[in-house]
Image: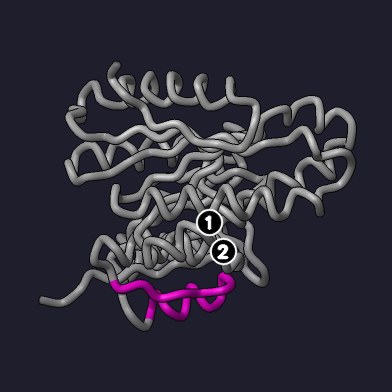
């Protein structure tokens, strides 16, 4: 059986790799374009089943790529998923008018998938019913630290953490994990149960080892992780229950006052 083909038009290597991991793991053949002109060439050469298109790209941006494809009778039916950090209504309207069929939002600070994409990933996982865990990651005492060092440097810290988490997830899962950025210093990882222990250990050890390189006084910072399995959760109500489980585990993790993790339990 022929694999369904997806063209991923994204100039950021980390984001392209993340999308490739998710779609490749789902059984798609992924083709990478680094700018709009290359995206147009790949679409016309391979006639993909889906085009994942970053809005902001060099040479030809995503909106113009969508306009050109939708204006061409040969390619006007190619489904387009816009990948963007732009969340204003006007930006979404512009994309839909250009020809996008749907949007996936990502965090502008880290370029990782944002809250809406996280919700969609959890929905997919709950429907699949496979042994999976969600991990909520946060930096303890980050708000005061960010106030002290300023927005730009605190965003660098968040960006670095996002990269470390992504690298840890890739290393332990072989490409089958998801990492998203809720906002601030909060992240979500979704991965199979068998990989959770290794992921958490890598995240904790990397954070503590790198903390000395952070700007300002980072001694009070700690990485706290809440882990909740999706086992027994239904697709219809499971997301809310998963949120409660993560909230309970995160409260316990933060109360320790140091880098640590807590696994949710019913007791």
- Write down the quadrant of residue 233 in the picture: top left
Q: Is residue 135 left or right of residue 35?
A: left
**Residue at the bottom extreme, as displayed:** 45
Q: Residue at x 37, y 61 (%)?
A: 173
- Tell me if I can see residue 90 in this picture: no
Q: Please identify the quadrant where the C terminus is shown.
A: top left
Q: Residue at x 28, y 65 (%)?
A: 49
Residue 153 location in percent, x, y? 84, 44
Q: Please identify the quadrant where the N terminus is shown.
A: bottom left
Please tell me whether mark 1 sits on a helix, a strand or a loop.
helix
Q: Earlier in the sequence, mark 1 or mark 2?
A: 2
Q: Is residue 175 left or right of residue 39?
A: left
Residue 63 location in percent, x, y? 56, 56
Range of magenta residues: 29-44
- Tell me if I can see residue 124 in this picture: yes
Q: Which label belongs to residue 95?
A: none
Q: Residue at x 29, y 53 (%)?
A: 194
Residue 219 location in percent, x, y? 80, 38
Residue in front for this viewpoint, 32 or 60 = 32
Query: Is residue 108 located in the magenta-colored stretch of the structure?
Result: no
State if disc 2 and disc 1 touch (CB < 8 Å). Answer: yes
How many marks the image carries: the answer is 2
Residue 199 location in percent, x, y? 45, 53
**Residue at the left extreme, as displayed:** 1
Residue in front for this viewpoint, 5 or 178 = 178
Q: Which label belongs to residue 166?
A: 1
Q: Disc 2 designates what residue?
A: 14
- Write down the quadrant of residue 143 in the picture: top right
């Amino acid at each position: 059986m022929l694999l369904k083909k997806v063209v991923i038009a994204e100039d950021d290597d980390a984001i392209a790799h993340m999308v490739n991991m998710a779609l490749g793991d789902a059984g798609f053949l992924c083709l990478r374009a680094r700018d709009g002109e290359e995206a147009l060439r790949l679409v016309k050469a391979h006639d993909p089943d889906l085009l994942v298109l970053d809005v902001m790209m060099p040479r030809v941006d995503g909106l113009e790529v969508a306009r050109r494809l939708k204006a061409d009778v040969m390619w006007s039916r190619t489904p387009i998923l816009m990948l963007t950090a732009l969340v204003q209504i006007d930006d979404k309207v512009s994309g839909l008018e250009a020809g996008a069929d749907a949007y996936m939002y990502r965090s502008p600070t880290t370029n990782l998938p944002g809250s809406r994409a996280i919700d969609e990933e959890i929905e997919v996982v709950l429907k699949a019913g496979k042994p999976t865990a969600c991990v909520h990651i946060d930096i303890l005492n980050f708000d005061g630290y960010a106030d002290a060092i300023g927005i730009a440097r605190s965003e660098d810290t968040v960006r670095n953490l996002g990269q470390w988490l992504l690298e840890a997830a890739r290393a332990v899962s072989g490409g089958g994990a998801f990492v998203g950025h809720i906002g601030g210093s909060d992240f979500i990882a979704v991965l199979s149960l068998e990989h959770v222990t290794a992921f958490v250990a890598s995240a904790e050890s990397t954070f503590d080892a790198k903390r000395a390189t952070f700007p300002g006084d980072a001694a009070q910072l700690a990485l706290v992780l809440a882990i909740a399995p999706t086992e027994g959760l239904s697709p219809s109500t499971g997301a809310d229950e998963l949120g409660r489980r993560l909230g309970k585990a995160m409260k316990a993790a933060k109360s320790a006052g140091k880098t640590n993790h807590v696994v949710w339990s019913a007791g």
